[in-house]
Image: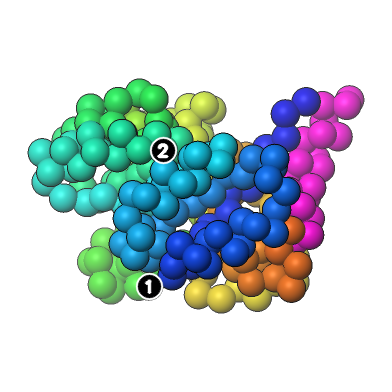
Amino acid sequence: MREHRPVIALDFPSFEAVKEFLSLFPAEESLYLKVGMELYYAEGPEVVRYLKSLGHSVFLDLKLHDIPNTVKSAMKVLSQLGVDMTNVHAAGGVEMMKAAREGLGKEAKLIAVTQLTSTSESQMQDFQNIQTSLQESVIHYAKKTAEAGLDGVVCSAQEVQLIKQATNPDFICLTPGIRPAGAAVGDQKRVMTPADAYQIGSDYIVVGRPITQAEDPVAAYHAIKDEWNQDRNERNRL
């Protein structure tokens, strides 16, 4: 039975820090790793090639947001890195998302950011001047993302069920802001435990500091992975 892997956010400033972190894990263990802006802008595409050479899956989290032609061209470049998943901002519009899909091709999953999990409803209404509820904004972006032909969205776990109802059950919901019970929330406003995220229907979870800054990152990873898979495994045994 295939286990689902939490996506580890490699929020490190350098290639050396990444190598040091990965050296803690057995060489044969295939991980799902998120490369974000800090690491990619510091080290460039070589870090992605390195991770792929080790047999890991890569979510390249660059949140592209530009005119359609620019995003399409950028996605053509990213498609050559062999990433397993990447993303754009849904706020870029349907035409931009369609262009991103065309540039990336079908080999990798393409998802869109709805509202960042660090954004509260009052912040959205004040700074973005979106005068609906945060939930309504997220659902609207998710429906537009599905209309553009993308595979899913980045969203808070609290919104997963409504997004799947508004789109379809196979529409991917990737949820950051996952914290084990009792862990510090940090700068995330909307968080959930791995077990809760499974129960509510998240397809992927992203975990950063609770693993990367743990006293024993490998043990922390496996504890979160076990929690993420526990209810799934119990259900499959029934």
Mark 2–mark 1 distance (CA, rounded to whole Å): 35 Å
Task: Characterize the local packing of mark 2: few (<14), some (14-19) or many (20 or more) Cα atoms within 10 angstroms.
Answer: many
Location of mark 2 (residue): 83
Quarter in which the N terminus is drawn: top right
Query: Which of labels 2 and 1 is toward the front?
Result: 2
Q: Is residue 52 above or below residue 46?
A: above
Q: Which residues are magenta?
A: 219-238
221 in the magenta segment: yes
Residue 126 x %, y %: 28, 73
Write down the residue under mark 1: 122
Residue at 50 percent of width and 39 percent of height: 53
Q: Main secondary structure of the magenta part?
A: helix
Front in this rendered view, residue 50 or 113:
50
Q: Nearer the viewer, residue 19 or 40?
A: 19
Indicate the amino acid at tag 1.
Answer: Ser
Identity, as a three-letter code, of the amino acid under mark 2: Val
Q: Is residue 137 left or right of residue 230?
A: left
Sequence-first disc among 2 and 1: 2
Q: Answer whether residue 196 is visible to the viewer in this image.
A: no
Q: Residue at x 82, y 34 (%)?
A: 233
Residue visible at 53% across and 61% down in the picture: 18
Q: Position of residue 229 (x, y in %)?
A: 76, 41
> Position of 23 compared to 63: left or right?
right
Residue 206 appears in the picture as rendered: yes
Residue 229: say if magenta. Answer: yes
Q: Which mark is residue 9?
A: none
Secondary structure state at the residue bearing disc 2: loop
In the image, 45 versus 150, the foreground residue is 45
- Residue 79: percent from the left, percent from the top? 31, 34
Q: Is residue 16 above or below residue 233?
A: below
